[in-house]
Amino acid sequence: MLDVGGEMGALIIYTGRDLHGREIEISRVDQDGTVRTHSAVRERIVRDGVFHSAVYPDLTAGLYTVWWDEETPAGTISVNGGAIAEFVWPSSPTRSA
């Protein structure tokens, strides 16, 4: 269950089964990756089948970096207060310009 409202939102990162058990870190963009939080990828059983995801239930609204590994971003996602943001794990990390 997710409790969102006001300035608090949530994030769900959808992954493949191959990431089951992996910890995925995120950080607010304005904190330059220095303060991170993590969540483990878990199997979720729903009416239509099974999927794998990492859930971040109580995030302050803002722009977040999703980290591929300690140094490489997988992408960014905007979390809005009162809403659930969704991010699909990419097949490769984000490339810098």
Image (cartoon, rainbow, N blue to C red):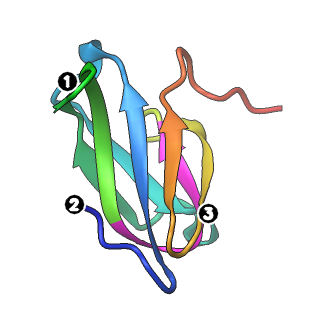
Mark 1 in CB contact with mark 2 (< 8 angstroms): no
Residue closer to the observer: 7 or 70: 7
Q: Which of pointers 1 and 3 indicates the residue nearer the eye?
A: 1
Q: What stretch is highlighted in magenta?
A: 58-67
Q: Mark 1 points at which residue?
A: 20
Q: Which mark is residue 29?
A: 3
Residue closer to the observer: 12 or 75: 12
User: Could you tell me the amino acid type at mark 1?
Assistant: His
Q: Residue 1 carries which label?
A: 2
Rendering coords of residue 94 (x, y %): 65, 29
Rendering coords of residue 82 (x, y %): 50, 74
**Residue 70, quarter of the rendered image:** top left
Q: Say which element carries label 2.
A: loop
- Circle count: 3
User: Could you tell me the amino acid type at mark 3?
Assistant: Val
Residue at 54% across, 23% down = 90
Rendering coords of residue 75 (x, y %): 61, 39
Which residue is farthest front? 47
Residue at 51% across, 83% down = 7
Marks 3 and 2, how far apart at CA: 26 Å
Is 52 left or right of 71, judged from the image as shown?
Answer: left
Asked if residue 88 is among those painted magenta in the image, a careful observer would answer no
- From the image, which quarter does the C terminus lie in? top right
Q: Say which element carries label 1.
A: loop
| Category of crowding for the residue at label 3, using alpha-carbon neighbours closer than 10 angstroms: few (below 14), some (14–19), many (at least 20) | some
Name above or below for residue 72 compared with residue 29: above
Marks 1 and 2, how far apart at CA: 20 Å
